[in-house]
Image: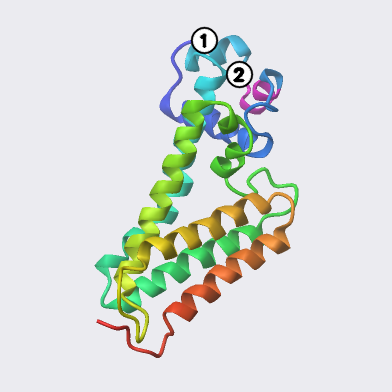
Amino acid sequence: MGRMQSFERITVVQAARDLFWDKGFDAASLADLEAATGLKRSSIYHAFGSKRGLFDAAVEDYQDTVIRPRLRILTGAGAGVGPSAGRASLIAYFAELRSAVCALPEDSPRRGCLLVNCAAGLAAHDDPARQVVDDYRSELTRALQDALRAAGSAPGESGPDRAPERARTLASLGMSAMLLARVNAAESVALLDTALDQIRAWFPQDAPAAG
């Protein structure tokens, strides 16, 4: 196979991405990848070096097209006006996740999060994959901290910065919800509702934030 045009590569990578998203790395066979991408295994190896090389390309595409556009909702909070922008960005982020879970049919390959799904499989015994998943957790937690700090302190609150602790809580709820989305969408939605309720409890809409 000759060198793929960029649009062909994107099509192939995203087809493989959805297969890995659905089945995970280990369960996605080369025959599955051939069927999903329309490439023979020799072409897959020529273009990506290995099944793992194709997986790495799929993860990179997932981060660029799914993860980071969502995180921009949070990281852009500081550009807003006042603490209300931070609160609004937190609510928008979890509301978008909730909408995504509710909108997908049970047979969709895009249920949950490819990286969170990976944490229960490949990342358990593969150091590079483990690093990718942990880097995602760190990136999500930092983005949540940015939005929490933009939201300011809760009314009547003083003392140490609570953003790191609250970011861990919200990140855990979000990642757990994305894992459960594959097996129990209703419980996934309930976890995301818990995150939304917690944000509203920390930052009541009609109460001014403490300075």
Position of residue 118 relative to residue 195, above or below, is above
Q: Going 62% across and 33% down the picture, which residue do you hit? A: 20
Q: Residues within 10 Å of mark 1 (few under 14, many from 20)?
A: few
Q: CA distance from mark 2 to mark 1?
A: 9 Å
Residue drawn at the location 37% of the way across and 80% of the way down: 154
Residue 151 is situated, as x and y percent measured from the top left of the image, at 33, 73
Q: Which residues are magenta?
A: 32-38
Coloration of the structure image: rainbow
Which is nearer the eye, 70 or 118?
Answer: 118
Q: Is residue 160 left or right of residue 144?
A: left
Against 181, residue 123 (above or below) is above
Q: Is residue 79 left or right of residue 113?
A: left
Choose top left, top right, bottom left or bottom right for residue 186: bottom right
Q: Which residue is mark 2?
A: 39
Q: Which residue reaches farthest front?
A: 159
Coordinates of residue 83 in the picture (x, y in percent): 31, 77
What residue type is disc 2 on? Leu
Front-most of residues 140 and 16: 140
Callouts 2 and 1 close, C-beta under 8 Å: yes
Secondary structure of the residue carrying numbered label 2: loop
Give the percent coordinates (x, y) of residue 173.
56, 60
Of residues 169 and 191, the one nearer the viewer is: 169
Residue 80: mark: none
Residue tagged 1: 1
SS at badge 1 = loop
Q: Quadrant of the C terminus?
A: bottom left
Q: Is residue 69 magenta?
A: no
Mainly helix, strand or loop, the magenta region? helix
